[in-house]
């Protein structure tokens, strides 16, 4: 998560954005590689093994988030106990997953950016007009093409990769990028997304991970400690915990004051 990675990602985004903005037909040409004009379908969409691989990719991605989810849930019920894992890791993994795979995709762009999916455009036997990546005025009303939620979820694995030991980190980054790319190609093969949809998903996921990692881990003015995050979660969950304990006839008192750094 250094500046070199950011510059490379932004450079790729600029090249792809300009090239596919000037020549939006490139998106159609790439999508056509997976389209069978004889049957007028994207054949891989009906393949059982490919469908399993698609689902498995999401299981793998969410599998990396499960430990953080469990640690947070347990902390909400038992704020008197320390987190089961690093507080910074819990915050980093869950915030980046929520933003990249949830808010920025399904709750924002995909709901208001009316770009039809490949299977929906007239060039591939669909009812609607193709729209370039930069134009939100398509006929799709909801759950649209731009940008790919599953692609963003797959590329989100850059977040757990960023937490691996430094000696393994380059390999972890390579694995996350490969995983995101393969998952994205599969979405294109199903006719679910254009190339610019999955490329944007990768860029957005990277930027979210880069920014949140900097906020929690790297930047001195905002950098957090595991103890600070644990204490913040304790204060948040304590009123509910205290109410439950009072109902059981035991008053645990106010939330404990956070320990002052030595």
Image (cartoon, rainbow, N blue to C red):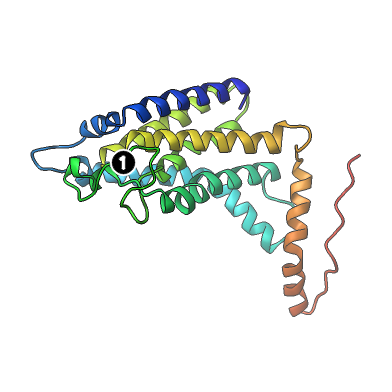
Relative image position of residue 198 (x, y in whole percent)? 39, 36
- Label 1: element kind: loop
- Res 48 visible: no
Location of residue 261 in the rendering, given as x and y in whole percent from the top left corner: 88, 42
Q: Residue at x 55, y 46 (%)?
A: 99
58 on left or right of 24: right
Residue at the spot x=76%, y=53% of the render? 232
Quarter-of-image position of residue 36: top left
Q: Quadrant of residue 182?
A: top left
Can residue 255 be seen?
yes
Q: Seen in the image, is 42 located left or right of residue 18?
A: left
Instruction: Name the residue nearer the viewer: 45 or 28.
Output: 28
Residue 205 vs residue 252, the one in the foreground: 205
Q: Toward which corner of the image does residue 220 lie, by quadrant? A: top right
Q: Residue at x 65, y 42 (%)?
A: 89
Q: Position of residue 80 (x, y in %)?
A: 77, 60
How would you rate the neighbour count of disc 1 (Cα within 10 Å): few for under 14, some for 14-19, many for 20 or more? many
* Quadrant that contains the C terminus: top right
* In front of the other: 117 or 212: 117
Total numbered badges shown on the rendered structure = 1
Q: Residue at x 71, y 31 (%)?
A: 218
Q: Which residue is mark 1?
A: 131
**Left or right of residue 55: residue 12:** right
Q: Quadrant of the N terminus?
A: top right
Q: Position of residue 260 (x, y in %)?
A: 90, 46
138 horizontally vs 229: left or right: left
């Amino acid at each position: 998560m250094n500046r070199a990675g950011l510059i490379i990602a932004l450079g790729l985004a600029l090249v792809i954005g300009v090239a596919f903005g000037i020549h939006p037909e490139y998106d159609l040409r790439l999508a056509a590689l997976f389209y069978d004009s004889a049957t007028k379908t994207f054949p891989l969409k009906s393949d059982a093994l490919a469908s399993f691989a698609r689902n498995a990719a999401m299981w793998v991605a969410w599998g990396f988030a499960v430990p953080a989810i469990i640690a947070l849930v347990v902390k909400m019920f038992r704020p008197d106990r320390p987190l089961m894992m690093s507080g910074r890791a819990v915050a980093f993994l869950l915030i980046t997953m929520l933003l990249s795979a949830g808010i920025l995709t399904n709750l924002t762009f995909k709901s208001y950016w009316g770009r039809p999916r490949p299977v929906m455009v007239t060039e591939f036997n669909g009812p609607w007009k193709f729209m370039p990546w930069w134009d939100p005025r398509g006929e799709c009303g909801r759950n649209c093409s731009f940008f790919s939620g599953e692609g963003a979820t797959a590329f989100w694995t850059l977040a757990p990769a960023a937490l691996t030991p430094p000696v393994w980190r380059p390999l972890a980054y390579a694995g996350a990028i490969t995983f995101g790319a393969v998952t994205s190609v599969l979405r294109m093969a199903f006719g679910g997304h254009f190339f610019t949809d999955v490329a944007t998903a990768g860029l957005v996921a990277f930027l979210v991970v880069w920014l949140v990692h900097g906020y929690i881990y790297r930047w001195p003015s905002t950098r957090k400690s595991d103890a600070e995050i644990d204490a913040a979660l304790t204060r948040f969950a304590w009123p509910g915990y205290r109410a439950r304990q009072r109902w059981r006839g035991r008053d645990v008192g106010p939330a404990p004051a956070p320990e002052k750094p030595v």
